[in-house]
Image (cartoon, grey):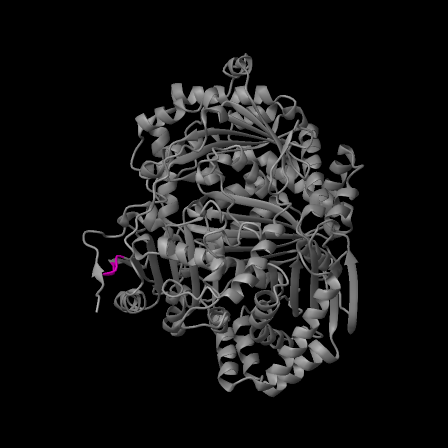
Amino acid sequence: MPTAVKSANHEVISSPLDQRQYQLLQLANGLPVTVVHDPKAQQSAAAMAINAGHFDDPQDVQGLAHFLEHMLFLGTQRYPEADDYQQFISQYGGHHNAWTGTEFTNFYFNIDSEQFAPALARFCEFFKQPLFSQHWIEKERQSVESEFRLKQQDELRRLYQVHKVTANPAHPFAKFSVGNLQTLQDTADKTLQQHLQAFFSEHYSANRMSLVLVGPQALEELAQLAQHYFADVANHGREKLTVNEPLYRPEQLATCIYMRPIKVARRLILTFPLPSIDNDYRYKTTSFLAHIIGYEGPGSLYSALRQRQWVTSLSAGGGISGSNFKDFNVNLQLTESGYEQIEAVTRWVLAYIRLIERQGLETWRYQERHNTVALRFRYQEPTRPLDLAAQLAINRFHYSAEDIVYGDYRMDGLNIEQAQQTLALMQVNNLRMTVIANDVPVDQVTPLYDAEYSMVPLTKQQRFALQQVPDDFHAQLPAPNPYIPEDLQAQPLSKADAAKLSHPQALIRQCGLTIWHYQDPDFRVPKGHIYVNFLAANVVKDARHFAIARLWCEMLMDALNEACYDAEVAGLHFNIYPQQTGISVHLTGLSAGLLTLLKQILVAFKHAVLDPSRWQSLKHNLMSNWRSAHTHKPVNQLFAELNHRLQPGCFPLLTLAEAIEDLSFAEFHQTAEQLLQQVEAVALCHGDWQADVATELQQLLAQHVHCNDTRDQLPHVQMLARGEQQETLATQHNDSAIVLYNQGQQDDLHEQTGYMLLNHLLGPDIFTRLRTQQQLGYLVGSSYLPMRRHPGLLIYIQSPSHEPAQLREHISRCLQQLVAELAHLQASEWQDACASICAQINDSDPNLRVRSQRFWGAISLGDECFDRAQQIQQSLQRWDQAALLRFAQQRLLQQPANLWLMSD
């Protein structure tokens, strides 16, 4: 029998604070394996990445790699039932997914650790003997067609298609990656089933795979699992074919591409094609250059363009990448004035790049960037096993074995030669300008997604003009960042018994102010979260006030951006946003600087200088985004309508846009000043602070905000009458959509756990029947959806092939069948369901962020005991099968409170 062989001389580099253990193996069949012992994990996870993607599609069956990804879920020789894997994962509290990219495909799942071995038994068969059943091939073609049609109006998908048709047609990037009914069919020489079998045999080979297993099990046990289940995955010995064609032909450079979007937009993308950057990962040269170009602090390129009222945002460095190419993009959101000055904007960007070339390649700049990245690596949040497995499976292809964890952060030194070569390629003759606006000149339509576009070469005169430095150019390179700390250590726990505390304590309770505090004994890193909620009835008084509050928050964020950008780079982050009870501030990052940052924000609440011209620009952008709601997926429009109908303080986006259409700056200023006149503040400090931080926060809030006990009640959920209610919404989309919300009749724990059980037991079957078997659409699902703890069951479908009335009939019939089948539920299935829900709610917080969110959610809902998990567990114990059957019959069939939302 083949044996696992440990890779020699490879010790995985990880953070000093990382408690996980890593081991690299290679099975006798050539399969690289990474096993990770995570002592705190309560679930186990696996991922298998394959070095094959849509670049490998046959020219006459485009989308085949993606289609094969779908088909692997639909039965194997050992487990032929199409829903066996999905049902098993769901039954034991797990999740599963997969994606197909350009050159890689990735499959991954997590599950209760006790069921990891039987889950792997099913998972491994994907890569050995998939069925490729003709019956499911025909059904899944419809599913892929639905997925294709689902994205017909997706702006990013349409831009991506314009990118493809303006690139080298001989490069595999130009292929259609998703597939549809036209491309996924029999050809003259092979049936579609034979194409699947050939692709699988050609590309799904052990030497081109990467397996990762993560869990609380010991490394030796995980290695044995890998050996037992994956040692006989076939190795066909076929190497990956090298892509030699350039991404662009010479005539596709020094060009301007115009594209008309569906939504209102004004955007400029400056693309500089580069060679592959895979071999530069140890130095991160393009990342370093992107940091300088995209800097938003004082004197920056962004600051200069913003002062001219030409742009509202600038980002750098993004763009597609692959084994023989990398697009370096500078992405700018333009104002109306900036749209009229596209040539001037481009000249400024190019002039700034030349400035970097002359003065920016200094060791201290690189070292400063290295230090911030090193801090992120050292104090990174622990990753969930599922995310870690999926990430490491791909990293095994991109990095040296010892760098699969560290590779994303590694910065060994400034590679001057690489930086100079990269900057030399950032010039006009190697530039693709993409202008996205609703009135650009177009003369072509893409054969897929119907995107209107044109591509014209830059004239000699244009190329010359773009290279000229503007007369008033004065942008500066970033100065040294004063916020980057030299050394950080977690503060000692403030009490000997602090480790015994399991939840926050309300250290300050006074008129209009409550401050909760928790120094975390588990995540001992110098980081933290501060939440402050200003309860203010004025914010949700009506749609106009809420829209003004949102605009005011946007203005504050914009006004603070430049002054706080260095802090952001150093790891201090903030957000200001309105919600159903008022306005919230959330700060996160290195704990030492968060109170100082909060002080800046609170000062801005009263003293920020709000520029009328910026106000006009932000108001226009906000209204444009709200007005584009009709372009959202139909099912998402129905979700928004559901929230509006049932949750006070949720307003339709079009209503918000209309509410401030005639708003003047003077009225905005006057109303904004009144938003926080009568507030009650509730705050949480969680992380690396001792208890005295509560007093500091109290003093800070007292200096800048006048808090009173407003005695405002939490908004109540709108209750549905028993029976069937149906509403139709105009969605302006070719697909039909339907949402059923079945609302619970009480908000107590018994009702909540009843709905949790129903969702757990019925959810997988709802998906299997409506999506897999009946192929009603690609977007099909169900979930437990409480609103302010008032429970409910949500079922949704978006369909390209069925009318809403038909979808309603299918859902009703499905529920009737599933409720009837509950009577035949096996005792073991009942026990597994209860155990799985208990395991999920008792799952330990994976990191500081998730724990903070849990604490803040409890505080927001008035749960001051923080014992919801124990209460749910106790409530589950009071259920039995007979009681749940009666509950299901009454709530879902006999006396339902149903709201049906349907597209027109």
How far from the left and from the top, in percent, is residue 110? 43, 65
Task: Tell me residue 56's x, y (percent).
Answer: 42, 47
At horizontal 64% and vertical 80% (from top left) the residue drawn is: 819
As drawn, is 448 to the left or to the right of 629?
left
Q: Say which quadrant the N terminus sits in.
A: bottom left
Question: How many labels, in total?
Answer: 0
x%, y% of residue 125? 38, 67
Q: Is residue 98 visible?
A: no
- Left/right placement of residue 789 relative to residue 198 reads right
Quarter the C terminus occupies = bottom right
| 493 falls in the magenta region | no
From this view, report whether residue 764 is shown above or below residue 327. Answer: below
Residue drawn 31% across the image and 57% down it: 206
Q: Could you tell me which residue is drawn at 47 percent across and 63 percent down?
A: 96
Q: Is residue 29 magenta?
A: yes
Is 121 placed above or below 34 here?
Answer: below
Nearer the observer, 846 or 767: 767
Horizontal and vertical percent position of residue 585: 59, 48
Kindly tell me whether residue 284 is visible in this rendering.
yes
Residue 334, above or below 487 = above
Residue furthest left as drawn: 8
* Viewer-side residue, 648 vs 711: 648
Stretch in magenta: 26-30
Q: Residue at x 70, y 66 (%)?
A: 741
Farthest residue, direction right: 662
State which quadrant residue 213 falls in.
bottom left
Q: Is residue 612 left or right of residue 305?
A: right
Magenta part, dominant SS: loop
